[in-house]
Structures are given as C-alpha cells and as structure tokens.
Image (cartoon, rainbow, N blue to C red):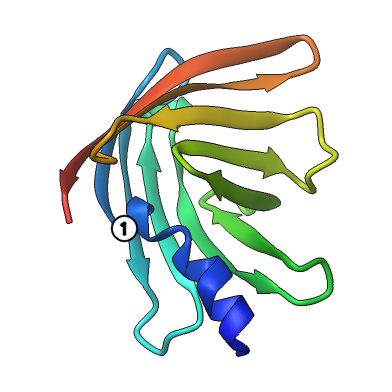
Amino acid sequence: MTENAIDKLRSLEPLLGTWRVEGPESTGTVRYAWAEFGGWLVQQVDLGAGDTANRGVEYIGYDKETDSIRSHFFGGSGEILEYTYVLDGKELTIYFGGPDSPAKFVGTFNDDFTRNTGAWAWPGGGYESTMTKESD
C-alpha cells in the first residue's frame, strides 16, 4: 500500500473502538478495529433484534481505482453492500455506493470524537442516528 493510501485509511482512526448506536431504525453496537493482517478497517455490526436485526461485518479499505475509502458489508441475511467513507474534519459522510449517491449518512463528531450525531437520508426517507463511544 502506498503512503497516500495508508494516510487516507488512517483518516478513519477516530472510528476505532466500540460504539453504542441509537436511533429509531438502528439500536445496538458497532465495533471498528484494524484487521490483524493490516490494510483494512473492520466493522462488526450488531443492530436491532429479531426480524429487524442488522448483523454483519464490513471491510473498509483504500480503493486505488477511485482514490477513495470504499467498503463491502457482508450482512447476516446474505446481502453484500458497498459504501464510500469520507471524514472531513468532524464531519463523517458514508455514501451508499459511490460519492454521487443520494443515499448517505452525514454526521458530526463532538470535539473529542466520542459522539457522532447525524442522519441517514435517501430519496423519500431517512432516520436520525447517534453513536456514542463506549470503549477504545
């Protein structure tokens, strides 16, 4: 991996740790950690319960072709979803698909990056969501 690629991926370091997620469509925990073999940030997702559970794993890495941070989410129901991550200062944007997508999460971190408040939005819908850091 090039130095530029490593720097871009490291821009997401504020996400490292376990987070409590609360919102009308998503309550539970997510955990971001570096992959043991390096080169990837891994998110473990455990949101909701019963029939509305959203569980899975997401691998986040640098995509040389698009010069961006891209991911693949592998869900417990067999779905495979793609996202693009951008952290600019305190603003985190997670696009469903690429950065031209109208479906995205936009949230703002507090000063010490222990809380992120924002919303998922897409044409015709969306919901608010808050992440609070529980541990590193």
Residue at 62% x, 54% y is 78
Q: Choose top left, top right, bottom left or bottom right for residue 10.
A: bottom left
User: At which x and y percent is residue 81?
Assistant: 69, 51
Q: Residue at x 38, y 29 (%)?
A: 48
Horizontal side of 97 relative to 110 (left or right) equals right
Amino acid on which the number 1 mark rests in the picture: Leu
Does residue 47 appear in the picture of this structure? Answer: yes
Query: Which is nearer the eye, 88 or 53?
Result: 88
* Up-down relation of residue 60 to residue 84 (above or below): below
Quarter of the rendering occupied by the C terminus: bottom left
Residue in the foreground of this view, choosing between 64 and 21: 64
Is residue 55 shown left or right of residue 133?
right
| Mark 1 residue crowding within 10 angstroms, few (<14) / some (14–19) / many (20+) | some
Q: Position of residue 56 (x, y in %)?
A: 47, 53
Assign a secondary structure to mark 1: loop
Q: Quadrant of residue 28?
A: top left
The residue most toward the left is 135
Q: Quadrant of residue 33?
A: bottom left
Q: Residue at x 44, y 29 (%)?
A: 108
* Residue underneath mark 1: 16
Relative to residue 37, is residue 126 depicted above or below? above
- Asked if residue 15 lies left or right of residue 123, the reply is left
Residue 80 seen in render: no
Residue 98 at what x, y percent from top left? 79, 48
| Image location of residue 68, percent across then percent down | 71, 63
What is the count of numbered marks? 1
Residue at position x 60%, y 90% in the image: 1
